Image (cartoon, rainbow, N blue to C red):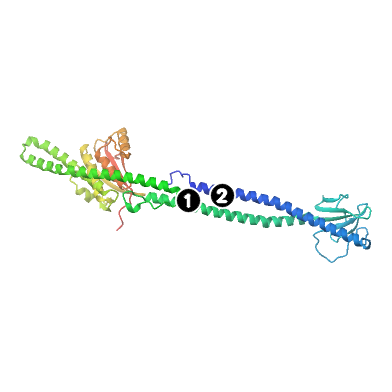
Amino acid sequence: MTSSTPRLPSLRRELLKALTVVSMGWVVAVFLTVVIGVSRQVDDLMDGALQESAEVLYGILMLRGNDLPLAAGSSMPAPLHDEGLVWQIVDERQAVVLRSHKAPTTPLLPRFVAGFSNAAPDWRVYALELPTPGQALYVGQPGTDRAESRYEVIAVVGAAVLLVGLAFALWLRRRIVRAMSVVQDMSLQVKAYDPMRTETDLPPAAREEFVDIREAIRELGQRLAARVEREQAFSAHAAHALRTPLAGMEVQLALAMKEAPPGAQPRLELARESVNRLKRVVTSLLTLFRSGEQLQLEDIDVARLVALMQVEALVVHVDADCKLRGDANLLAGALANLLDNCVRHGARECWVSCSASEGGQTLTLRDNGPGVSDARRAALQAALDQTVSSESGGLGLKLAALVARAHKGRLTIEPAPGVEGGFAVSLFLGVPGPRAH
């Protein structure tokens, strides 16, 4: 995938995103539920402790109430200590007559209300009426102490809930990643699967859901392999069958040229050139279908390769240091057919150049022939890009396109720059360039 290709949706990313959202929602919901439940439970426990403390004090007052030093604003003697609960005894005028040493001097409640009350500024109070007429017992707890206790419990329980939720989410994430890795493994196996090579056969399915998929892919691959084998066998047989009579025709034409009068020589020469051109096409077909997908990559000096070809009536200019890496036999067949096209379409000169690009290398041929219109060039390119047979385009171009495709590349037809009315083709080869020496 290139940088310009839009990023496709990913099943793995979508599952992980859904897991993250669900896990976070679940943790938040459980945390809020725990906060509400714990807050109420802690309040109930502290109210129970407040009520029990008031009832214990009430029992003590019933036993020793006459011995208490009741006086306005007096407090019980006690060593310095922190009081979680304070208490007061008030008379009928709501005046404090006895209190614990941390209790305020003013009454916790402005008026007596039996049971629990919330008093200003921040007190939770439980009130009991004493046997002495007009007297009441107030037991209170500061709201700050209650809030602190509540928050401590919420923090401990909430942290435990969050940790458990996080551990559960991480476990689920690992399970999803592990399950999706099986899909990734299968995609890599399918990518490496070549029905023409038994060693790349798909391994047994790792999951029940993949059994039918694996069998469908193998059946399709076997059908394609059988079809390719039939086509290769037919093409090879046809090429062999054609090569023998063509060789005989060449010999007969050579003898005829020796015996024919001068006036018949040009026509015989054209016939001989046509036979040679057909022989090159047949040789290219035979080489292509013999090679299959097993490319024999090697460093190629394009100038030497062109020098070995007998291309009459065409001057070929090859750039210095024009070197490629590829299958020499296939590229020789492609070059021979492309140069032959130049001659057949009226070109007298052809320029050959090489260039390196990201992910491969490019071989470009441009001639000084009449060229083609933009519409014709587009039609030829469309025909070459098709993987099925098309009547558009010449056989030479199609063979060159097959050679480029065998190198994981593409043949492109483009206007010849700098040559008026010329024709140019570029073979992009998707294999690394020549090795540095």
16 displayed left or right of 396: right
Residue 311, horizontal then vertical, whole percent: 18, 44
Callout 1: SS: helix
Residue drawn at point x = 39 percent, y = 45 percent = 216
Question: Does 423 sit above or below residue 434?
Answer: above
Residue drawn at point x = 77 percent, y = 57 percent = 145
Residue 260, horizontal then vertical, whole percent: 6, 37
Disc on res. 180: 1
Q: Residues within 10 Å of mark 2 (few under 14, many from 20)?
A: some
| Label whose residue precedes the other's in the sequence (1 or 2) | 2
Residue 164 in sight from this viewpoint: yes
271 displayed left or right of 427: left
1 displayed left or right of 92: left
Task: Count the marks.
Answer: 2
Name the front one of labels 1 and 2: 1
Asked where in the image residue 412 lies, by quadrant, the reply is top left
Q: Nearer the viewer, residue 160 or 107?
A: 160
In the rendered structure, which amino acid carries the disc numbered 1?
Met
Residue 318 in sight from this viewpoint: no
In the rendered structure, which amino acid carries the disc numbered 2?
Thr
Callout 2: SS: helix
Label 1 to label 2, Cα distance in Å? 16 Å
Quarter in which the C terminus is drawn: bottom left
Residue 284, horizontal then vertical, whole percent: 23, 45
Residue identifier under label 2: 20
